[in-house]
Amino acid sequence: MTDLSNIDISDNREDLICYGFDSSFVLGVNPALVAWPRSVEEISRLLKYALEKDMSIVPRGAGTAMTGAAMPLRSNTMVISLEKMRKLLDINTKNMSVLVEPGILNGTLQKELFCLNFFYPPDPSSLNFCTLGGNVATNAGGPRAVKYGVTRDYVMELEAVLVDGTIIRCGGKTHKRVVGYDIKNLLIGSEGTLAIVTKIRLKILPLPEDVVTLLVSFQDTADAAATINKVLSSNIIPRTLEFIDKGCIKAVQSYKPNLITEAPSALLIIEIDGNIPTIKREAERVVAICNQFKGNAVLAADVYSRELIWDTRRSISPALYNLKKCKTNEDIVVPRDRIPEILLDISKISEENNTDILCFGHAGDGNIHVNILTDSREGQDKEKLERILKRLFEATLKLGGSISGEHGIGVTKAPFLSMEIPDRQITLMKEIKRVFDPQDRLNPGKIFQV
Ligand SMILES: Cc1cc2nc3c(=O)[nH]c(=O)nc-3n(C[C@H](O)[C@H](O)[C@H](O)COP(=O)(O)OP(=O)(O)OC[C@H]3O[C@@H](n4cnc5c(N)ncnc54)[C@H](O)[C@@H]3O)c2cc1C
């Protein structure tokens, strides 16, 4: 039997309860064991032990997954929490790369890099409490994705442990490479179902000379949607273009009253970064577009005002929990030019079902967070929720979109996978899963419905 001495593990009930759910608040089951390894060798030993004991394994970062991806579904599960592997191992400004352990918070890396005049572009709104390992496993995006892309665009190399305890390295220190099948990219976004990521080498970029932040208010949502289209087709690439609807604004107003004082129907947060003369010119053009659609643009005068605007944006998700007992957050994405249509579809679905559906999100890349508020997830509410989700995904796919722009599939969207992915491709995916994990022990029940 593999020796687990010197590895932090617990089967105390209070620990097991803490690792039996994630931010989806869909109930999983408590695991049988939680482990907090501090090295890749410890993870390798834990996986060998799990094999001997026929246990399932759920790798876990900070548990901010919105899809149930980080929670166990079987009781004989070992949760491997990466939260104690949080070292920033190397910063190489000449190669413009960093090497990190998976449990480091995204926000911690951002702060370290800022001091060196560099930045790591993917910035999920959860950056202050989600891990880079979780970001890799979900291919996380964020507000800056509209200009800079998502996690996958920045991962150069991964070290990972396979289900039998074998340690592999894929990718490397170079900024490009084309050698055989790309296993590194297969692991990115695989939601902990293929391997456990234990080291990550990421590209970093020099900080832009300056950033302009505009908060634009509209009395009519259609005008905000038209502005998004117009800005994106004006040969300007904003670094963020975020949308917030009336319901979300109201929720933030009652959650943190000092953040927004007026009551518009929609807000856009538009940021442009780059060289000072260029962004000044571009900001003037963006303000003119906003005015054309009756938007009132206010410029953040300093770092403090910019932070206040982002505090507003990042408060939406917690604020929505105050409105109703259950919030189901979907992250659909449509082609950028179809945003006005999907917003109209969503408001129709909301009316038809007599249910509050509130929207905000990364409109610049067509990615809208759709929040369905219900009193429960049981009985009639459950049926209604299923009906709404089906209608939402049908409308999204009809516009050429996808059912997930950044959160992934996890458990909650597994029943809808086949709406988007043809059967032959699902079979191919399942065959890949079997190659990595023949006994289905790594994060079972995720992505594919059981
Ligand atoms: C308020 C809020 C705002 C959010 N905003 C965004 C956003 O803007 N953009 C966005 O993309 N997401 C967002 N999310 C979702 C979530 O933060 C991301 O999916 C994030 O990447 C998850 O990181 P985590 O460390 O919490 O991972 P967890 O939730 O712990 O795990 C997520 C998945 O990754 C797997 N995993 C974790 N670590 C590893 C590892 N080392 N090796 C292998 N698999 C692993 C888990 O098994 C699970 O499948 C938000 C969530 C919240 C609560």
Image: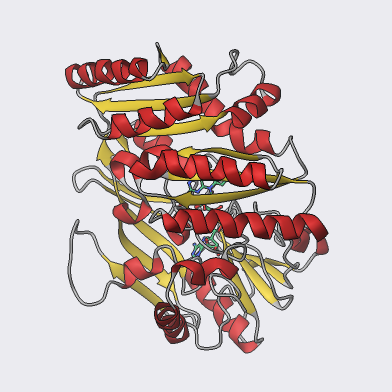
Left or right position of 308 against 399: right
Residue 43 vs residue 326, the one in the foreground? 326
What is the x, y in percent for residue 374? 74, 47
Please determine whether, in this image, residue 318 is positioned above or below residue 257: below
Left or right position of 3 against 322: left
Please determine whether, in this image, residue 11 is positioned above or below residue 277: below
Q: Quadrant of residue 117?
A: top left
Answer whether residue 250 is visible to the viewer in this image.
yes
Residue drawn at x 40%, y 53% is 399
Residue drawn at x 30%, y 26% is 272
Left or right position of 114 against 259: left
Split into 4 quadrants, where in the image is the N terminus?
bottom right
Answer whether residue 121 is visible to the viewer in this image.
no
Q: Residue furthest top?
A: 301
What is the x, y in percent for residue 128? 53, 39
Please determine whether, in this image, residue 176 is positioned above or below residue 375: below
Residue drawn at x 50%, y 88% is 438
Left or right position of 292 against 43: left
Please determine whether, in this image, residue 434 is positioned above or below residue 351: below
What is the x, y in percent for residue 271? 35, 26
Residue 435 vs residue 158, the one in the foreground? 435
Split into 4 quadrants, where in the image is the C terminus?
bottom right
Callout count? 0
